[in-house]
Image (cartoon, helix red, strand yellow):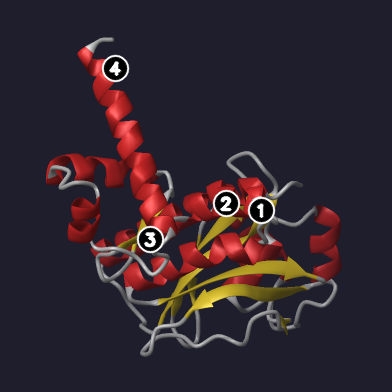
Amino acid sequence: MSKEKGSSLIGLRRSFEALELLSRHKEGLSFSRLQSELDNLPAPTLSRLLKVMDDENWVAKNSDGTYAPGSQFINVSRRISSGATLEDLISPVVTDLAETAAETAAFTIFVDKNFVFKAKCEQPDSYHHIELNRKSSAIFTNGYGMANLAFQDKETINSCLEDIPDSIDPKEFSDKLAMIKEEEFLFSDERLGIRFLKPVFYGEDGKFAGTMGLSCIVRKTTKKEFEIYKSLVTKAAIKASKALSAIKQ
């Protein structure tokens, strides 16, 4: 066996050991505790392992710096046992997004000309959304509503447009929906603040699942802040899409 192959197998074994540890400590373990439990594995080696597993959603780094089972870990575990729901798979991603951005994050889906919050994590000084599973009909004025509507079929969109308020131009609104679908992103400047919204799919090439977003009670952001929020939402949407690969469509 070559030295390179042997090192790879050792790293794989250590990764499995780390996952087994985290499965028994769902609240999370610190880096030092993991290192200790893994026979004082060298810090650089453990850092590399955790980064790879974090990138692939096998572990998740909490806001306090501890490590916990990631969405992919939960995905596989529940698929083997009793099966995971959309909320099971999305909620950890939403929580991680909110804690990383220090702003309220949520995931919504489209239901019968309405949008519905299926997961949310609200920060004390940021947005507080309506309760989970309650329908909101604000599809023409709320960013979540528009982002969800943009990815519906033409028949559904046309049906919704029959109820568009007189204050909104149907042509301009339709053009906006087309732009959202093409760019797969919406920056929504609204009465109470701003939102950064990104579509989520059932796997990279799957059908539309819903909208991941951050809501901020501010009127303006710097260019740097804008790019940071957009990047965080984009990464969260990608993680969510990977997690939802467990749900058959």
| Proximity of marks 2 and 1: CB atoms separated by less than 8 Å | yes
Q: Residues within 10 Å of mark 2 (few under 14, many from 20)?
A: some
Residue 225, image quadrant: bottom left
Q: CA distance from mark 4 to mark 2?
A: 28 Å
- The x and y percentages for residue 50 are 29, 47
Q: Residue at x 38, y 89 (%)?
A: 124
For the residue pair 26 and 244, the one nearer the viewer reads as 26
Q: Name the amino acid, label 1.
A: Ser
Dot 4: what SS? helix
Q: Are marks 4 and 2 in contact (CB under 8 Å)?
A: no
Q: Nearer the viewer, residue 12 or 157?
A: 12
Q: For residue 81, which numbered disc appears in the image?
A: 1
Depth-wise, is mark 3 or mark 1 nearer the camera?
1
Q: Identify residue for label 4.
A: 5
Mark 4 and mark 3 in contact (Cβ < 8 Å)? no
**Left or right of residue 145: residue 62:** left
Badge number at residue 77: 2
Regarding residue 167, the answer to whether it shows in the image is: yes
- Residue kind at label 4, given as amino acid type: Lys
- Distance from Cα at disc 3 to Cα at disc 1: 19 Å
Asked if the residue at tag 2 contacts the one at tag 3, i.e. Cβ–Cβ closer than 8 Å, the answer is no
Tell me the number on the disc at residue 68: 3
- Counting every numbered tag in the picture gives 4
Mark 3 and mark 4: Cα distance apart in space: 28 Å
For marks 3 and 1 on the same chain, the one whose residue lies earlier in the sequence: 3
**The N terminus - image quarter:** top left
Residues at circles 1 and 4 in contact by the CB criterion of under 8 Å:
no
Q: Is residue 196 visible?
A: no
| Residue displayed at 30% across by 73% down | 221
Q: Nearer the viewer, residue 70 or 26?
A: 26
